[in-house]
Image (tube, grey):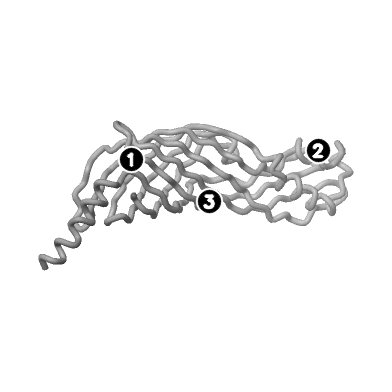
C-alpha cells in the first residue's frame, strides 16, 4: 500500500504543478428555436417558405492557458448545424422542396476566473468558474426575397421553379455569400481533473445577431474532454 501511495503521490503533484494549459475536444447542444416562415414575395403569386429548425448540435476543440495571474485565457472553435426545407412557388409551378442545412462556424475568445474551489473525492482538482468573452461567426444565409430576385434575373413571376433549386443551393453554399458576424458571451460551469485528464461542463449564453435567424442570441450546454499539461 505504501508503495502504491509513493507512486501515485508524485504524479498528483506533477499534475497540479504543471497544470498551466490544456487542450481537447468540445461537444455541445445549442438551445434555440426557428419557426417556419411563409412569405408572399409578389402579392400571392410568389411564395417562399423556409422550414423550422431548432437546437443544433456543435462539435469542435479548445485550448487554454492557466498560468496568467487573475484570469485564465481560452480559445475554442466549433461547427454547428441543423437541417430544414426550402420551398418556392410562383405562377409557373412549385419547386421540389430543397433539403438544406443551416451551418455556422464559430470562434470564441474567453477570459475566465475561478469562483470557488471544490474538494471532490478521487478528483485531483475541481473548481467553479465564470467567464466573459468575444466571439466571431461565419453562417450560411437563409433564402430571402433579395437572394431569389437576383437568381431569377429580377423576374420572380416567370422564374422557372424546376431550375431554381440547384441555383439556390450553389448560391447558399458559396463561402463568399456566408454572413459574417460578431458578438459577446457569458459562461459558467465546472472544471474537474483526474491526473492529467481535464473535463469541463459549462453553459454559455451568446449575444450576437445574424447567426440564428430572427434572434439576438442563443444558449449552449457544452462538455469538454482533454488533457491538462
Which numbered disc covers residue 219? none
> 10 Å neighbourhood of mark 2: few (<14), some, or many (≥20)?
some
The percent position of residue 80, horizontal first and vertical second, equals 55, 49
Say if 181 sits above or below 80 in the image: above
Q: Work out whether residue 218 or residue 107 is closer to the camera in this orientation and state it.
A: 107
Q: Using residue 83 as the reference point, say whether residue 200 is left or right of it.
A: left
Q: Is residue 221 left or right of residue 15?
A: right
Q: Residue at x 69, y 56 (%)?
A: 99
Residue 81 image position (x, y, % from top left) = 57, 51
SS at badge 2: helix
Viewer-side residue, 114 vs 171: 114
Give neighbour class at mark 3: few <14, some 14-19, many 20+ (Cα, 10 Å): many
Q: Which residue is mark 3?
A: 56
Q: Residue at x 32, y 56 (%)?
A: 197
Q: Which residue is mark 1?
A: 66
The residue under label 2 is 149
Q: Is residue 129 above or below residue 3?
A: above
Amino acid at each position: 500500500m505504501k508503495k502504491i501511495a509513493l507512486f501515485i503521490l508524485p504524479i498528483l503533484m506533477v499534475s497540479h504543478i504543471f497544470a498551466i494549459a490544456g487542450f481537447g475536444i468540445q461537444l455541445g447542444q445549442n438551445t434555440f428555436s426557428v419557426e417556419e416562415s411563409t412569405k408572399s414575395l409578389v402579392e400571392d403569386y410568389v411564395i417562399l417558405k423556409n422550414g423550422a429548425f431548432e437546437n443544433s448540435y456543435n462539435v469542435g476543440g479548445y485550448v487554454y492557458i492557466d498560468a496568467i495571474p487573475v484570469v485564465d485565457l481560452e480559445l475554442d472553435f466549433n461547427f454547428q448545424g441543423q437541417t430544414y426545407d426550402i420551398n418556392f412557388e410562383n405562377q409557373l409551378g412549385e419547386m421540389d422542396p430543397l433539403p438544406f442545412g443551416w451551418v455556422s462556424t464559430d470562434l470564441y475568445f474567453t477570459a475566465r476566473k475561478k469562483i470557488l474551489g471544490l474538494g471532490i473525492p478521487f478528483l485531483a482538482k475541481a473548481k467553479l468558474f465564470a467567464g466573459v468573452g468575444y466571439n466571431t461567426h461565419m453562417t450560411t444565409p437563409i433564402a430571402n426575397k433579395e437572394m431569389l430576385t437576383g437568381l431569377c434575373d429580377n423576374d420572380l413571376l416567370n422564374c422557372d421553379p424546376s431550375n431554381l433549386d440547384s441555383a439556390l443551393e450553389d448560391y447558399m453554399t458559396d463561402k463568399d455569400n456566408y454572413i459574417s458576424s460578431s458578438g459577446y458571451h457569458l459562461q459558467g460551469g465546472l472544471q474537474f481533473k483526474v491526473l492529467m485528464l481535464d473535463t469541463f461542463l459549462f453553459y454559455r449564453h451568446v449575444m450576437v445577431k445574424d447567426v440564428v435567424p430572427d434572434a439576438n442570441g442563443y444558449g449552449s450546454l457544452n462538455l469538454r474532454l482533454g488533457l491538462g499539461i
